[in-house]
Image: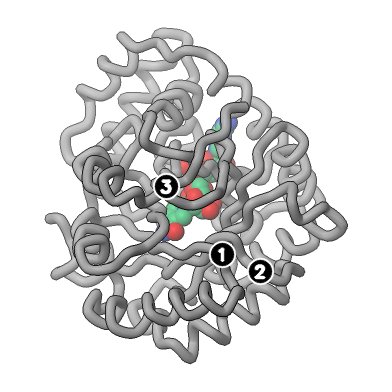
């Protein structure tokens, strides 16, 4: 496994990291013991970074992850979680200082740790970015000074909301999802500025939250129908070449030198092992190029209209 430094932090992250949202039954119902086995498989095969949130399964993922991490030496993993998102609706967001502080206490309790390595505001495009800049980020900065968290950042989907935050605030890292994957690589627009400011880059969802798999997207997936159709064509094209689309998707997503780590979610130890093996091999570049020509309408709207790219 290759390890990369995250921006200006002193964290060194495995190129492939573990996203714990499936432990909250986000994609399908998961047997808790199999979920825990997947976390142990990740740690035993060189993955040293795990991401979670109270939103995943409405605290279930953090609770199961806490059980998985029990008894494991704290220096074996870099742990991130988030605050501010507690459900799917606009009204489920609260990025006030009071809620962020309470949320951190609750997450630490569920995860069974004293400190988070990275603490994010979860999906900032759903709230007023001026509020994020004036109250939520100063709260994270204060928590860092108090030694409750080591580093902080923001997560989200539209590039627009990241741009506004990094223009006005010195954050340690961003977590972007579905914007550097086979179907859409628009995160690259933001990379030069992130690199210049030494803001660490975490890329999440190499399969675009299931779109680039044989099973396809879960019913809550925000992609429009034309993207879902394009992904199905991509699956068929890869099948024709005898390649599993998820293999190609994994290889594509982990292959950008400015991205420190890519988070993949699964609660299946065998699929995690496949992902670990796949990323060690060089991708079929010609097939990547052919597959990428299939996608026309890759981006969807997320959060408040004014925070969107489209
Ligand atoms: P993902 O692209 O990693 O896809 C997960 C889906 O792919 C699951 O259905 C899983 O079963 C399937 N899968 C994984 N490996 C497979 C394999 N080898 N074969 C077949 N299917 C396979 O999407 P994700 O889980 O949403 O993203 C990864 C992590 O990134 C999340 O768990 C979370 O920690 C983080 N994330 C954060 C945000 C945010 O902060 N807003 C958003 C998305 C993801």
Q: Which of the marked residues, 3 or 1, is nearer the chain's N terminus?
A: 3
Q: Is residue 22 among the parts visible in the rendering?
A: no
- Of residues 135 and 19, the one nearer the viewer is 135
Q: Are marks 1 and 2 in contact (CB under 8 Å)?
A: yes
> Which comes before the other along the chain, label 2 or label 3?
3
Residue that badge 3 annotates: 7
In the image, 16: left or right of 8?
right
The circle on residue 115 is 2
- Relative to 205, residue 256 above or below: above
In three-dimensional space, the C-alpha distance between marks 2 and 3, rounded to whole angstroms, equals: 20 Å
Give the image location of residue 142, x and y in percent: 47, 80
Relative placement, left or right, of 143 versus 165 is right
Left or right of residue 69: residue 96? left
Sequence-first disc among 1 and 2: 2
Name the colour scheme.
one colour
In the image: residue 52, left or right of residue 247: right
- Which residue is found at the position 59% from the left and 66% from the top? 57
- Give x and y (percent) for residue 123: 37, 66
Q: Locate residue 257, reporting x and y percent.
A: 38, 29
Q: Is residue 310 above or below residue 121?
A: above
């Amino acid at each position: 496994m290759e390890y990369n430094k995250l921006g200006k932090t002193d964290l060194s992250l495995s190129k492939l990291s573990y996203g714990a949202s499936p432990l909250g039954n986000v994609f399908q119902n998961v047997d808790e013991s199999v979920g825990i086995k997947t976390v142990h498989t990740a740690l035993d095969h060189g993955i040293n970074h795990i991401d979670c949130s109270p939103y995943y399964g409405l605290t279930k993922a953090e609770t199961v992850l806490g059980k998985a991490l029990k008894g494991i030496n704290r220096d074996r993993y870099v742990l991130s979680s988030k605050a501010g998102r507690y459900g799917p609706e606009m009204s489920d967001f609260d990025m006030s200082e009071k809620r962020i502080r309470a949320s951190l206490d609750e997450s630490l309790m569920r995860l069974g740790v004293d400190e988070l390595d990275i603490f994010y505001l979860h999906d900032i495009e759903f709230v007023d970015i001026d509020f994020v800049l004036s109250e939520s980020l100063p709260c994270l900065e204060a928590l860092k000074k108090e030694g409750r968290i080591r580093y902080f950042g923001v997560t989200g989907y539209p590039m627009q909301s990241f741009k506004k935050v990094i223009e006005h605030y010195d954050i340690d890292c961003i977590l972007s999802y579905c914007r550097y994957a086979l179907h859409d690589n628009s995160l690259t627009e933001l990379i030069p500025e992130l690199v210049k400011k030494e803001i660490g880059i975490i890329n999440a969802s190499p399969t675009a939250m299931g779109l680039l798999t044989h099973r396809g997207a879960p019913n809550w997936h925000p992609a429009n129908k034309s993207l879902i159709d394009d992904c199905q064509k991509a699956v068929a094209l890869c099948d024709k070449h005898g390649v599993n689309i998820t293999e190609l998707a994994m290889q594509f997503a982990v292959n950008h030198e400015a991205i420190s780590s890519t988070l993949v979610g699964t609660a299946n130890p065998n699929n995690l092992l496949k992902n670990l093996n796949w990323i060690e091999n060089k991708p079929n570049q010609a097939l990547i190029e052919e597959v990428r020509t299939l996608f026309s309408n890759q981006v969807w709207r997320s959060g408040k209209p004014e925070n969107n790219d489209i």
